[in-house]
Amino acid sequence: MLLLPVVGVINLFLRFHTVLPLAAMVFTSLLAYYFYWQDKRRAQRNEWRIPEANLHFWSLVGGWPGAFVAQQQFRHKTKKISFLSVFWLIVLSHQVLWFDWLLMDGKWLLSVLA
């Protein structure tokens, strides 16, 4: 799952000499991991939970690797099909975008947006 994003980030560094995409992916992954951890703790304590939309937001903006690790490590949100469906659509969309960037030079996304 990380092959395309890692190659994509390396490609961006080589083409544009920027580490910002890597830094953003690491930062959002750490935030997603933190929010999953917090939500699991709150669930165990019967406290106010973090909305699922917030967890999905951090996955969508690039933190899906951290969210995936947190899901597995904390066994949190691993059985709720409605949540997992959205999560895996987010992961798939990231894979498609990186595939487009690396193999089609972003032309597919540009045609969709145009």
Image: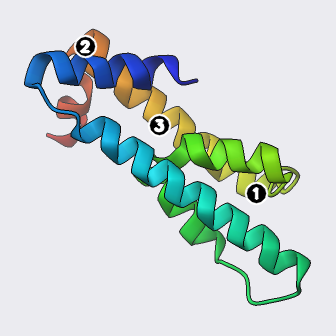
Q: Are marks 2 and 1 in contact (CB under 8 Å)?
A: no
Q: The N terminus appears in which quarter of the rendering?
A: top right
Residue closest to the eye, 83 or 50: 50
Q: The C terminus appears in which quarter of the rendering?
A: top left
> Circle 2 is placed at which residue position?
104
Query: Disc 3 versus disc 1: distance between alpha carbons?
Result: 17 Å
Residue type beneath disc 2: Met
Is 104 positioned to the left or the right of 28 in the image?
Answer: left
Is 6 positioned to the left or the right of 22 in the image?
Answer: right
Residue closest to the eye, 36 or 111: 36
> Circle 1 is placed at which residue position?
82
Dot label at residue 93: 3
Is the residue 27 above or below the residue 72 in the image? below
> Percent from the top left, x then y, of residue 25?
40, 42
Q: Is residue 71 in sight in this rendering?
A: yes
How dense is the environment of label 1, judged by Cα within 10 Å: few (below 14), some, or many (20 and up)? few
Residue closest to the eye, 43 or 82: 43
Count the labels in the image.
3
Q: Which color scheme is applied?
A: rainbow
Q: Is residue 107 in sight in this rendering?
A: no
- The mark nearer the N terminus, 3 or 1, is 1
> Percent from the top left, x then y, of residue 48?
74, 89
Q: Secondary structure at mark 3?
A: helix
Q: Quadrant of the rendered structure where residue 104 is?
A: top left
Query: Disc 2 versus disc 1: distance between alpha carbons?
Result: 32 Å
Dot label at residue 43: none
